[in-house]
Amino acid sequence: MTHPTVSVVVVSRDRPIALSRCLTGLSQLQYSKFEIVVVADPAGCRAVQAGPFTDQVKLVEFDRPNISEARNLGISHAAGDIVAFIDDDAVPEPSWLHYLIAPTDRPNVAAVGGFVRGRNGISWQWKARTVDTRGEAKPLSVSHNRATLLKPKGRRATKTEGTNMAVRRDVLVALEGFDPGFAFYLDETDLNLRLAHAGHATAIVPMAEVHHGFAASPRRRHDRVPRDLFDIGSSWAVFQRKYVPESQRRDHWRAIRNTERRRVMSHMVAGRLLPGDVRQLLSRLDQGYGQGLMRQRGGSHVSRSPISAFKPFPSCSRASVVLAGRSWQRQRLRAEAAKRVEQGEIVSLFLLSPTTLRHRLQFHSDGFWEQSGGLFGKSTRSAPVFRMFSFGERVAAETRRIGRQRLISSPILARLGNT
């Protein structure tokens, strides 16, 4: 199969450190023909220019808080056959594009979406879902081992997540990209509904995994507590005007507002917000909704021809290796992992303690994957709280779990610390 060219668009605002980490992850993608388009605010641009990838990416400065406009600018600069999207606070598995783009060898597949792991690196944040014209998403049962092709059916569309999706560039141009009326929130939901309305099929690819950190931003804290609900309110107003009959909007908004109220109240009960914070957040939600009722819809502009030529990222074939040891050996093993990354390897580091601690996985800023937890603790949340393993058995079991995404071949190249 001939691999199509892919443009990976990363929009970044107020998160230069996260952006640098995202680019480090993207640099390890095992795909032959891709470019990276970064659309960032001045702080993000400075971070890219100070880092190792400044000459290897297309860097576009954009300093307005509108993710749809920023993505459309990225599409205009994208010269790939397919445009993939990932958030600046996310990191893809090295196999991400390999799996994500594979279904596009079928000409009737216009869009693809993958699965998203949450902050602990193991639990699922989002899997397969559908969404309707009320913005209500429902889980969808699909195979976890192969791509599932879904054609539009009824009033529901296949839901893809903005941090792990790709669309044919010519389809994005025909649909005029993302609607700038959605400055933040519901932007990809609107695109999903328009894809379905146009009759386009979408493939869900569970093996195409992205790890999403939910980093802090002006809209939310690091613990996911909201700081401002204005843009959520305004986006719902725009969404209603596009999809919800006028006679149903009052009840629809009441249900949305009650959902947001329950969400912020739960944070207050947990001690993360004060009563005054709740009042302020709901007031901002209402203000946003009022503004959204007057906000212009549509009016986006996506360049039919790419603004700049395809700029292939200098990717290389990397061996994927495993390092493992006890938790008290972390300093030495992390240094070894960083060294091997510099030598051009994909590194998975396991640091295990003689406990039942739950496992966590993170992509280190030095470019390696680190999984830590108890030798007898669970990684997947459906596993038993305690399970007897020898050290070698546990490393082998966890390596099998991540092997396909991390592209770890058999036999495994394992370097174990003294045990």
Image (cartoon, grey):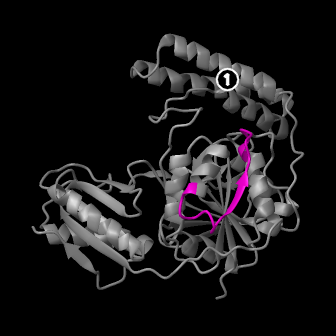
Element class at badge 1 = helix
Q: Nearer the viewer, residue 79 or 359?
A: 79
Q: Residues within 10 Å of mark 1 (few under 14, many from 20)?
A: many
Q: Quadrant of the N terminus?
A: bottom right
| Circle 1 residue | 285
Specify whether residue 354 is painted magenta.
Answer: no
Disc 1 marks which amino acid? Answer: Leu
**Rendered view: 327 above or below 5:** above
Q: Which portion, as a residue range, is magenta? A: 50-67
- Main SS of the magenta part reads loop
Say which residue appears at 17% left-offset and 53% top-offset.
Answer: 386
- Compared with 140, 409 (above or below) is below
The answer to which image quadrant residue 219 occupies is top right
Q: Position of residue 86 (x, y in %)?
A: 60, 57
Residue 72 left/right relative to 189:
right
Q: Is residue 257 visible?
A: yes
The percent coordinates of residue 93 (x first, y second) are 47, 66
- Name the residue nearer the viewer: 158 or 42: 42
Considering the image in quadrants, where does the C terminus appear?
Answer: bottom left
Q: Position of residue 138 (x, y in %)?
A: 59, 47
